[in-house]
Image (cartoon, rainbow, N blue to C red):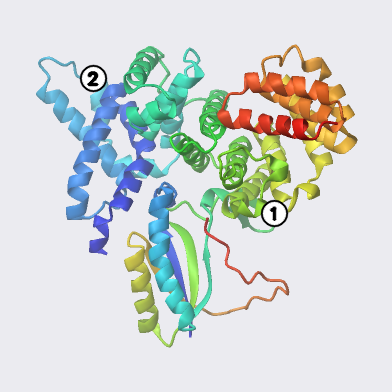
Amino acid sequence: MLYTLLCYNKEDVVWSWSKEEDDAVMNRLNVVHERLVKEGKLGPALRLLPTTAATTLRGPDMVIDGPFAETKEQLLGFYVIDVPDLDAALAIARELSAANPTSVYEIRPVALYLPEARPNAPKDRIKAY
Amino acid sequence: MNEVIHDPAWIHGALTAARPQAVAALLRYFRDMDIAEEAYQEACLRALKSWPQNGPPRDPTAWLILVGRNAALDGARKRSRDVELPSHDIISNLEDAEAPLIDRLDGSHYRDDVLRLLFICCHPELPATQQIALALRIVSGLTVAQIARAFLVSDAAMEQRITRAKARIAKADVPFEAPGPVERSERLAAVAAMIYLLFNEGYSAGNDPDRAPLCDEAIRLARLLLRLFQTEPEIMGLIALMLLQQSRLPARFDETGEAVLLDDQDRTRWNAKLISEGLALIDKAMRHNRPGPYQVQAAIAATHARAATAADTQWAGIDALYAALERMQPSPVVTLNRAVATAKLHGPEAGLAMIAPLEKALSGYFHYFGARGAFLLQLGRSAEARADFDRAIALAGTPAQAAHIRRHLDRLMHDPR
C-alpha cells in the first residue's frame, strides 16, 4: 500500500539553519533514506524550495504569488513509501522524526499514483547542495 | 515530540528567525532601540532556560515578544527611581495588547514593523558600510566581533562605529504610524539597496570564510521581506539575482584561490538548488510586467544560469538586457558590462568602441582596464594590452583580482604576438 509522508516545519527557521546544521539533519535522514532504498520501500521523495518561490493558481485566471495558505508551518517536502499498513508507515515516520526532530510528519494514504513517465527522466538524485 | 525540544539547532534557528519580527515589535512598543534590543536579549535568555524544559511555544516569535516586553517593563518598574518609564499613553496601549497580539503577528500589521526596523538602519545620513553594520547587529543579531571580522576592522573600532550609528538613528525620528503606499515603496527600495550592498560585501570578498556569511544573511533578510511583501517583483528580482550569483560560488575560485572567469567555470559545480529557486523567482517577477533594475540584472544572471556551457550563452539576450539596464540606471559600469556582451556578439572592436568614451569616468576602475586589456589582446595589440593589464594590477582590490590579471600577463610573456 502506498502512503505519502508529508514533512512540515517552520520554513523561516529551517532556512535559517547554517549549512552545517542543515547538513547534520540531512545526514541523519540519509541513513533512513538509504535503508528504505535497500528494502525497496522508497518511492519518489522531494524536498521543496521555500514558499517564497511558490505561485498559486486559483481558478483558471487567478495567479497568486506565494503558497496556498499562510500557515505557521509549511510543507517542506514529501516521500512516497510502499508499506503493508499504517503501523509500518508510522514506524518509518518515527525514524524520520528521530532524525529530523523538529519537523512534523503527516501520513496520508495515496489515492492515485502516476509513475515517472518522462523518457529522459534523470536517474540521479538532485543533490541537496 | 517532547524529546525534540532539546535540539539546540532548532532553538538557535528559532531565535535567529524570530529576531527581526521580535525586535521590530519591541521597538514599536518602547520606541527605543536599546530597550528593544535588551528586551529581546532577555527574552532569548529566558527561552534558552524555559524551552528545553517546557517545550517550545507554538509561536516562538509571539512568546519572545511577550516575554521581552514584560521583562523590559518589570526592569523599568524596578529601576523607576533612576530610569524614566516610557510615557504613560504608550504603556496603556499595551494593556490590552496581549490577546490580539498572536492574531496580529499573522496579519499584515507586523510587516510594517519589520520594514521600519530595516529602514531605520538605512538612514540616508549613514554611510553605506555603517548601514550594513547596523543591520547586521540589530536585525540579524550578529555579534560585534563577527561584524568586525567581516569588515576587517578591530572589535573596538566596530563597536565605536555601531555606537555612533545608533546615536545618529536615535535622532532619525522615523514615524511609527503605518506608512502610506508611496512611503512604503520608498522604504522597500532603500531596504532592498541596503540588502544588496550587504550581499556584495560578501560576494566581492569571494572565498573569504569570514565574509561569505554576509551573502547568506542578505538572502535570508530578502526572503523575510518577500514573505512579508509577497507581490513585490523587485524583491523577487533581488533574491533571484543574489541566489543566481551565489550559485556560482563553488566554481568561482580554483584550488589555489585564484578567480575563475565565468567563461572558464566548471558549470557542473554551480549550485543547482540555488539556480532553481532563482529561476522560479525571476519567472514569477516578470509575470508582473513591472520591470526594474534588480529584475533585469537577475534576468542577465538567469541567462547565464540557463546556458549549459559558456558557448551556449545567449549573448544577444544579455546585450538587450544590459541596454534596458542602461536606460533604467545609466552608469559607465553598466555600459562596460554591456560592452563585454557586445564584444561576444560583434567582436572585440565593437566592445572597444563602446567603452572608449568611458576612460575618464572609469580611470580608477580595475575592471575597465581588465576588460579593455582583454579586448586588445584578442585584437593582437599586445603592447597596449600589457599596458592596460599593468594598470589593472595597480588598481586591483583583492589578491585574486591581481593574480588573475597576472596570468594574462604571463601568457603574453610566453606567447608574444
Q: Is residue B411 visible?
A: yes
Q: How far is disc 2 from disc 1 in space, using C-alphas?
A: 51 Å
Q: Position of residue A120 (x, y in %)?
A: 72, 71
Q: Which chain hosts label 1?
A: A
As displayed, is residue A57 above or below residue B228? Answer: below
Q: Residue A61, labelled with which disc?
A: 1
Q: Residue at x 32, y 62 (%)?
A: A101
Residue assigned mark 2: B86
In the structure shown, which secondary structural element does the residue marked by tag 1 occupy? loop
Q: Residue at x 33, y 73 (%)?
A: A94
Camera-side residue: B216 or B28? B216
Q: Nearer the viewer, mark 2 or mark 1?
A: 2
Camera-side residue: B123 or B335? B335
Number of on-image labels: 2
Tell me the kind of residue under disc 1: Asp
Where on the picture, by quarter, is residue B146?
top left
How many neighbours does mark 1 have within 10 angstroms: few (below 14), some (14-19), or many (20 or more)?
few
Q: Position of residue B245 (x, y in %)?
A: 61, 41
Q: On the rendered structure, is A117 left or right of B87? A: right
Q: On the rendered structure, is B309 left or right of A8? A: right
Q: On the rendered structure, is B159 left or right of A70? A: left
How many neighbours does mark 2 have within 10 angstroms: few (below 14), some (14-19), or many (20 or more)?
some
Q: Which chain hosts label 2?
A: B
Q: Position of residue B188 (x, y in %)?
A: 54, 29
Q: Residue at x 38, y 17 (%)?
A: B161
Tell me the kind of residue under disc 2: Pro
